[in-house]
């Protein structure tokens, strides 16, 4: 039995370690907005202001609160902001509003306290903006810090939930495992919605479980007469669960699955008229949703959806929605289910449901040690619950030891459906599993703590927790090195004459980024830029006309950049969809198109001189240039982790290559290197 003071000291230690891991490297890209989702949210955030008049505050086309419309007088220093036109905003509104509020608070605090703090603190220069960053960059500093703080809140809820269900030791161990979870550490460095969704989800489940346990503890039998009044604390927990569920849906629509554990909790412990409790919870959740996402309800001015839309196992019929929020939900549903043939989702062609997300967590998101403990613990929790059931008598709460089955039922009523639904998606971004991982940490901790031999228990805890901590510290070390796109941009400014043509790939970022170099502002606009369209157009659209257009650009250009594997990690893998484009990247890497590798750089998790590197070439069947192989062998020796999900490496640890056009081949000379498939 762990004493309260020891648990408190342990929890404080866990939170301090977690904070250090999450707040190290907030400027991981020099605040250049190399994460496209974050970039767009910050762009919208620059227009969220206090309304000039409350009479227009909730007018969809005049309000400065509406994420679905660029305000008529929108403006922000350093960036171009459209005015008076619709905009797509496919994210929850609550994180947007929280980020803007936190930034305004930091601006207020900076004007009062920045001068009294050490001038070289990150808090002073970035958060309180003593460095004088424009709003667009200051938003990045503040909101990334806010995301880290929110993830600390998730760790605290995991401790409380684990303690409530399995005891203090399990709660503390689960919190420690989440503190060193690499996927959580990485996502805490981005201002995106998933960490906020996870926080509100874990909060909702905590209060649901607390409600169930309080009621089960207050009655001699959960099947006792339901006319007795539930105690106030239990009722409050149920109400808070509904509020958190509404806030979670206001962050991301996938949280709508929380209404299932709410229904299970009402049915399990209230019984008679449980549906009335559930409907009340839905109403409370809707109010929380409306207060934090008002224009999801108020704005009906978007383009109408007139096509049938797949939504999981069912299809929404063709209906003229007109509502901006529903428009975004249906659009996102089409995307995650593989509809629309969207270029940036083709990376998941050929990946297996359930198995691919688990593989990515084992290899990258959690690491092998923690990943195995987590998913084995998940299976163990399901088996333990089934084993405790009386199959012929579902009134299992009559057992003497009722608490664990009830709590397990409520935990699994979220975890199992969420995994079954999310794991089935065609699109399998690793972050989609984040609302599940805190519960996997609890199951892993419970499984480890169940080991009866004390010496073996502590040995296994030390191996899993210690090994994962090593991986976490290795991962955070990537932020000690400048972002590869910053390094590549500095190389361009030093070695490429202004006015030369630099090619990038469509759906990827273009170099150079605008930077301050040696105290002087250097701008991307100093160079000509054009995009190669290998990822756009499939099947018959990947034909000779598309090839000719790209080869004309290659013949004219001075340099080509491959700043990530967004394109070369996908197109060569799909020769049926890209019969011509799939041949391009190997020809470029071999030097047969007349381009020579002149710069390569990257950054990966490492401790001392041992690196843990993803292999971005093997899965698409490419052979990297000798210069890349020499660079990796000499500068980044260590372990090859194999394929990695694009979303794990592309934002903060991409391998970046620059090629120079030395041979100056004509488009016709390059075209002869491609094999044109016969036409039927």
Image (spheres, rainbow, N blue to C red):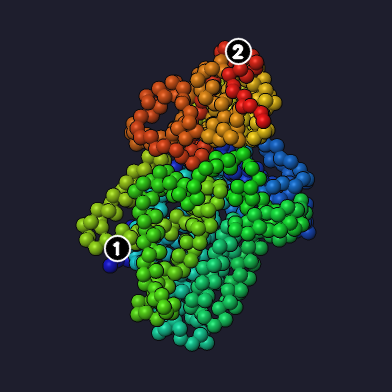
Q: Secondary structure at mark 1?
A: loop
Estimate how packed mark 1 is, as few (under 14), some (14 to 19) or many (20 or more) residues with alpha carbons within 10 Å: few
Question: Does residue 169 appear in the picture of this structure?
Answer: yes
- Separation of disc 1 and disc 2 at Cα? 67 Å
Q: Quadrant of residue 170?
A: bottom left
The residue labelled by disc 2 is: 664
What count of labels does the image hold? 2
* Circle 2 residues within 10 Å: few <14, some 14–19, many ≥20: some
* Picture layout, residue 550 above or below residue 616: above
Q: Is residue 92 above or below residue 551?
A: below
Q: Which is nearer the eye, 537 or 26?
A: 537
Query: At which x and y percent is residue 344?
Result: 59, 40
Residue 66 appears in the picture as rendered: no
Q: Say which residue appears at 63% left-offset and 62% top-offset.
A: 289
Image coordinates of residue 613 in percent, x first then y, are 41, 35
Q: Is residue 125 above or below residue 195?
A: above
Q: Nearer the viewer, residue 428 or 195?
A: 428
The C terminus: image quadrant: top right
Q: Secondary structure at mark 2?
A: loop
CB under 8 Å between callouts 1 and 2? no
**Depth order, front residue of 229/403:** 403
Residue that numbered label 1 is attached to: 450
In the image, residue 258 above or below residue 650:
below
Residue displayed at 35% across by 76% down: 401
Q: Position of residue 487 (x, y in %)?
A: 50, 27
Horizontal relation, residue 448 to residue 558: left or right? left
Residue 171 location, quadrant: bottom left
Q: Residue at x 27, y 53 (%)?
A: 460
On the rendered image, what quadrant is the N terminus found in?
Answer: bottom left
Q: Earlier in the sequence, mark 1 or mark 2?
A: 1
């Amino acid at each position: 039995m762990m004493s309260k003071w020891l648990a408190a000291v342990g929890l404080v230690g866990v939170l301090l370690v977690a904070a250090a891991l999450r707040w190290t490297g907030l400027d991981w890209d020099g605040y250049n907005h190399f994460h496209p989702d974050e970039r767009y949210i910050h762009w919208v955030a620059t227009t969220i202001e206090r309304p000039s008049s409350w009479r227009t505050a909730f007018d969809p086309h005049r309000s400065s609160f509406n994420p679905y419309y660029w305000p008529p007088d929108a403006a922000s220093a350093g960036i171009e902001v459209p005015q008076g036109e619709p905009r797509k905003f496919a994210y929850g509104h609550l994180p947007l509003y929280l980020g803007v509020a936190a930034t305004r608070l930091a601006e207020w605090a900076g004007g009062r306290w920045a001068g009294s703090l050490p001038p070289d603190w990150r808090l002073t220069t970035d958060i309180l903006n003593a460095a004088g960053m424009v709003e667009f960059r200051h938003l990045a500093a503040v909101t990334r810090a806010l995301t880290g703080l929110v993830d600390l809140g998730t760790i605290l809820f995991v401790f409380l939930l684990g303690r409530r269900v399995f005891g203090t030791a399990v709660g503390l161990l689960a919190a420690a495992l989440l503190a060193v979870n690499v996927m959580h550490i990485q996502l805490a460095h981005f201002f995106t919605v998933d960490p906020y969704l996870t926080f509100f989800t874990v909060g909702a489940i905590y209060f649901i479980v607390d409600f169930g346990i309080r009621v089960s503890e207050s009655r001699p039998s959960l099947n006792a007469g339901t006319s007795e009044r539930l105690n106030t604390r239990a009722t409050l927990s149920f109400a808070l669960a509904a509020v958190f569920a509404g806030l979670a849906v206001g962050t991301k629509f996938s949280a709508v699955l929380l209404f299932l554990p709410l229904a299970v909790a009402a049915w399990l412990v209230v019984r008679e008229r449980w549906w009335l409790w559930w409907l009340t919870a839905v109403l409370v959740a809707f109010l929380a949703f409306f207060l934090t996402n008002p224009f999801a309800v108020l704005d009906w001015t978007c383009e109408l959806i007139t096509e049938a839309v797949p939504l999981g196992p069912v299809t929404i019929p063709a209906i003229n929605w007109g509502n901006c929020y529903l428009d975004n939900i249906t659009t996102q549903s089409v995307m995650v289910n593989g509809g629309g043939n969207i270029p940036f989702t083709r990376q998941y062609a050929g990946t297996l449901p359930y198995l691919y997300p688990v593989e990515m967590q084992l290899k990258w998101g959690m690491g092998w040690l923690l990943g195995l403990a987590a998913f084995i613990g998940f299976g163990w929790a399901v088996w333990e619950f089934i084993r405790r059931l009386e199959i012929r008598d579902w009134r299992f709460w009559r057992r003497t030891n009722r608490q664990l089955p009830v709590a397990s039922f409520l935990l699994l009523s979220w975890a199992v459906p969420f995994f079954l639904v999310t794991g089935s998606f065609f699109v399998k971004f690793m972050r989609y599993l984040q609302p599940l991982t805190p519960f996997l940490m609890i199951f892993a901790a419970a499984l480890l703590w169940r080991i009866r031999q004390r010496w073996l228990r502590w040995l296994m805890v030390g191996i899993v927790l210690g090994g994962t901590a090593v991986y976490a510290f290795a991962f955070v070390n990537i932020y000690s090195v400048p972002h590869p796109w910053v390094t590549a941009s500095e190389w361009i400014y030093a070695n490429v004459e202004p006015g030369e043509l630099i090619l990038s790939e469509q759906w990827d970022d273009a170099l150079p980024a605008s930077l301050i170099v040696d105290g002087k502002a250097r701008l991307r606009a100093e160079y000509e830029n054009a995009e190669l369209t290998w990822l756009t157009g499939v099947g018959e659209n990947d034909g000779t006309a598309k090839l000719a257009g790209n080869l004309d650009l290659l013949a004219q250009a001075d340099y080509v950049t491959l700043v990530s594997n967004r394109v070369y990690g996908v197109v060569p893998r799909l020769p049926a969809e890209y019969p011509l484009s799939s041949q391009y990247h190997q020809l470029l890497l071999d030097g047969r198109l007349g381009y020579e590798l002149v710069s390569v750089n990257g950054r990966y998790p490492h401790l001392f001189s041992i690196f843990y590197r993803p292999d971005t070439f093997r899965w698409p069947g490419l052979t990297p240039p000798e210069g890349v192989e020499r660079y990796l062998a000499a500068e980044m020796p260590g372990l090859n982790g194999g394929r990695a999900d694009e979303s794990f490496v592309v934002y903060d640890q991409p391998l970046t290559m620059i090629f120079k056009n030395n041979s100056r081949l004509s488009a016709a000379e390059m075209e002869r290197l491609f094999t044109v498939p016969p036409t039927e």
